[in-house]
Amino acid sequence: MLDPELITAIADELAEAERTHALVPRITARYPEATIEDSYAIQRVWRDRQIAAGRRLVGRKIGLTSKAMQAATGISEPDYGVMFDDTMHDGGDRALLLDHDAFTNVRIEVELAFRLSAPLAGPDCTLEQVLAATAEVIPALEVLNSHIELQGRTIVDTIADNAAYGAMVLGGTPMPPDAVDLRWVAALLARNGEIEETGVAAGVLGHPARGVAWLANKLHQHGDRLEAGELVLAGSFTRPMWVSRGDTVTCDYGPMGTITCSFR
C-alpha cells in the first residue's frame, strides 16, 4: 500500500483540483503499485477534511453497477463515493439552472435515489432489507465531475476522485419502494430535445436495490454503515452523456415524472 503521507498528499492534490476545476495526471500512471484500498484511503482523507471544513455528509453514490457503465468506462466492478449537502439540488417539478463551470468533464447519468428510514449495515445486507429500510425512491440525475485525466483511467483513479461525483439533481415523483416494480423503471434522457440515452433500472445488478445492498456490505469492510436519513444513488442505468454550457437536459421517467436542468 502507499505510504500514509503520500495518501494525504494525493488527497490534498485532489482537493485543490476540485477548488480550481483542474485536471491532475492519473494516480496509477504515477504510482502503478496503488491498490483499491489505497484509493479508498485517499477518498477517506479527502472526505474527513471536507467535513472538518464544515461540509455535511448526506448520502453516498454508487458507480459502475450496470453493464452500460462498465462498458463505457472499461471498469468492471462497482465503486462508491460520498455526497455533501452543498451538492444536492431538489428540483421537484421545476427546471433547475446549474453552473457548468462548477464541474470538470461534465457528464450526466440516470439513476434512482433511495432515501433511507433506517440504518443498513453489512456484511450480509440483502435486497429485501434495503427495501424494508427505504422510505421512498426518487428519480435522480448525477452530474459527474472528474478531476483526474480520463484517458487510461482505472478504478483506483476513479475511487480516489470520490467516484467522479459532482452533484445530484432530484425531481419527478418520489414513490414508496413497493408502489412500483423498480426493475422496470425506465428513463428517456434527452439533450436539447433530442433523446441520447435510454435505459431500464434492472440494468443495475438486476434490481437497483441490489446496488444499495452492495454498498452496505462494502462499507462494512471499511468499518462504516448507511444511516437513517441518508440518500443513496444506486448507480446509472444509462451510459454517461456529455453536457456543454448552454445545454438543457431532460429525463422522462414515465409514471415517476420528469427532471429538467440547464447548464449556464
Image (spheres, rainbow, N blue to C red):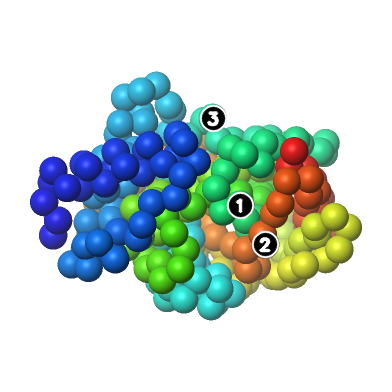
Q: What secondary structure is marked by label 3?
A: helix
Residue at numbered disc 2: 241
- 17 relative to 183, above or below: above
Residue 16 on image: x %, y %: 38, 37
Disc on res. 106: 1
Contact? badges 1 and 3 (CB < 8 Å):
no
Contact? badges 2 and 3 (CB < 8 Å):
no
Alpha-carbon neighbours of circle 1 within 10 Å: few (<14), some, or many (≥20)? many
Q: Amino acid at mark 2?
A: Met
Instruction: Calculate the distance from the C-alpha at mark 1 to the C-alpha at mark 3.
Output: 18 Å
The disc, 2 or 3, on the residue closer to the chain's N-terminal end is 3
Residue at numbered disc 3: 86
Residue 136 on image: x %, y %: 63, 45
- 111 relative to 89, above or below: below
Residue 226 on image: x %, y %: 39, 44
Any part of residue 127 in sight: no
Disc on res. 129: none
Q: Amino acid at mark 3?
A: Asp
**Residue located at (75% from left, 38% from top):** 264
Q: Quadrant of residue 1?
A: bottom left
**Residue located at (36% from left, 31% from top):** 50
Residue 209 on image: x %, y %: 53, 61
